[in-house]
């Protein structure tokens, strides 16, 4: 008997992408599949869109966050296998078939993850940059990923319930990172399947790209400092990115010193840049392969010369937030 597979999609004010998401999910032919959409207190027309599709709609009375929405979806599910994705992701027949093949051979102690396709649904430059960046970063350590992202996460229902689900006290993001780390501590193996890909809808402008980088870096820094793993090579928070950002700001300082009359710092800039290009060669190649010559070279230049700016802003905000929380805890101890 084919095990029932439950696709769980949390949604909060996702009307812009939700129709495309559900159209793709309901087009999949599978005799043993249920689709559960948990609306997290949306104030747009999301619920009206969901009701047009053959899926189980669960409505939360008020906005409670993605963790609670996913946990609620799991409680309403009947499947032996749970597959989590997002309301701005497009699932394909091939991806779901791959989930079935991998999970049929997996024990309860294995979680299978996937990533975005190298090219996004929309063809905007900053969307293409983001999709290629995330795909490369999340799939380069397939045998031992640091985390499995919830845009493509498959787990046996028994293992999910035994884990306690997603931490509902977490901030607005990184619940999947905390969940993955908790699973690993419980001796559950994380496996990345590079072939398991969902197509993401970004619709990113330059402002969206910066806003996303600042927001995610802010919470990454706080989580990593609390978790004492700031230098871990962790998906999009990769060692390549960390070295790239460090190189950018250190080179600015060295160039400033050179400008005020100490040109002896220029060789250090050249050395740092050379090391950075060497360490980042896999990602830079991924930009070129995914986006072609024009967008690829543009993505490389954006990554090296511009992207460190919002990452730096987010890092300062995260450090400030961490220091505030430590001060608050210390003053109330």
Image (spheres, helix red, strand yellow):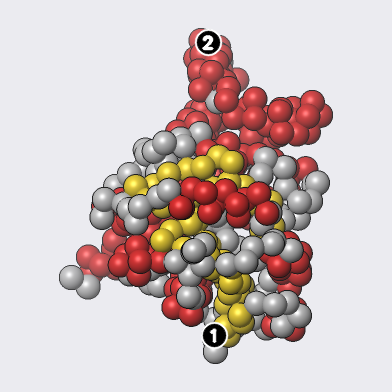
Secondary structure, mark 1, is loop
In front here: 61 or 217?
A: 61
Which residue in the structure is indicated by mark 1?
60
Indicate the position of residue 283 as horizontal and vertical percent values: 59, 29
Please tell me which residue is depicted at 51% across the width and 34% down the height of the picture.
140
Residue found farthest to the left: 333
Q: Nearer the viewer, residue 8 or 307?
A: 8
Which residue in the structure is indicated by mark 2?
267
Q: Position of residue 246 (x, y in %)?
A: 48, 32
* For discs 2 and 1, the disc positioned in front in the rendered view: 1
Q: Earlier in the sequence, mark 2 or mark 1?
A: 1
Residue found at the very far bottom of the displayed protein: 61
State the count of labels. 2
Residue drawn 33% across and 44% down?
229
Is residue 243 visible in this depiction of the protein? yes
Q: Quadrant of residue 178?
A: bottom left
């Amino acid at each position: 008997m084919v095990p029932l597979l439950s696709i769980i999609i949390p949604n909060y004010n996702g009307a812009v992408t939700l129709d495309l998401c559900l159209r793709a999910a309901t087009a999949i032919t599978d005799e043993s599949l249920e689709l559960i959409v948990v609306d997290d207190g949306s104030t747009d027309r999301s619920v009206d869109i969901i009701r047009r599709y053959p899926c189980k709609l669960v409505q939360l009375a008020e906005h409670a966050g993605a963790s609670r929405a996913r946990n609620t979806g799991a409680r309403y599910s009947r499947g032996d296998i749970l597959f989590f994705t997002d309301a701005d992701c497009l699932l394909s027949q091939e991806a779901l078939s791959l989930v079935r093949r991998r999970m049929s051979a997996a024990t309860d102690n294995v979680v299978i993850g996937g990533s975005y396709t190298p090219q996004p649904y929309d063809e905007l430059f900053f969307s293409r940059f983001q999709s290629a960046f995330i795909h490369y970063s999340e799939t380069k350590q397939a045998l031992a990923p640091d985390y499995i992202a919830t845009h493509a996460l498959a787990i046996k229902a028994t293992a999910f319930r035994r884990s306690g689900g997603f931490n509902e006290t977490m901030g607005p993001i990184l619940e999947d990172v905390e969940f993955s780390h908790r699973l690993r501590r419980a001796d559950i193996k994380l496996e990345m399947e590079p072939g398991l890909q969902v197509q993401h809808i970004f619709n990113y402008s330059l402002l969206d790209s910066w806003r996303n980088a600042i927001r995610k870096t802010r919470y990454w820094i706080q989580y990593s400092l609390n978790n004492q793993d700031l230098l871990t090579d962790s998906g999009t928070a990769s060692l390549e990115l960390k070295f790239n950002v460090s190189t950018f700001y250190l080179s600015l300082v060295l160039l400033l010193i050179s400008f005020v009359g100490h040109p002896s710092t220029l060789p250090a800039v050249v050395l740092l840049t050379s090391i950075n290009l060497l360490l980042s060669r896999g990602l830079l190649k991924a930009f070129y392969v995914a986006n072609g010559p024009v967008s690829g070279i543009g993505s490389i230049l954006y990554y090296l010369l511009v992207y460190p700016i919002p990452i730096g802003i987010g890092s300062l905000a995260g450090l400030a937030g961490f220091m505030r929380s430590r001060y608050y805890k210390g003053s109330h101890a």
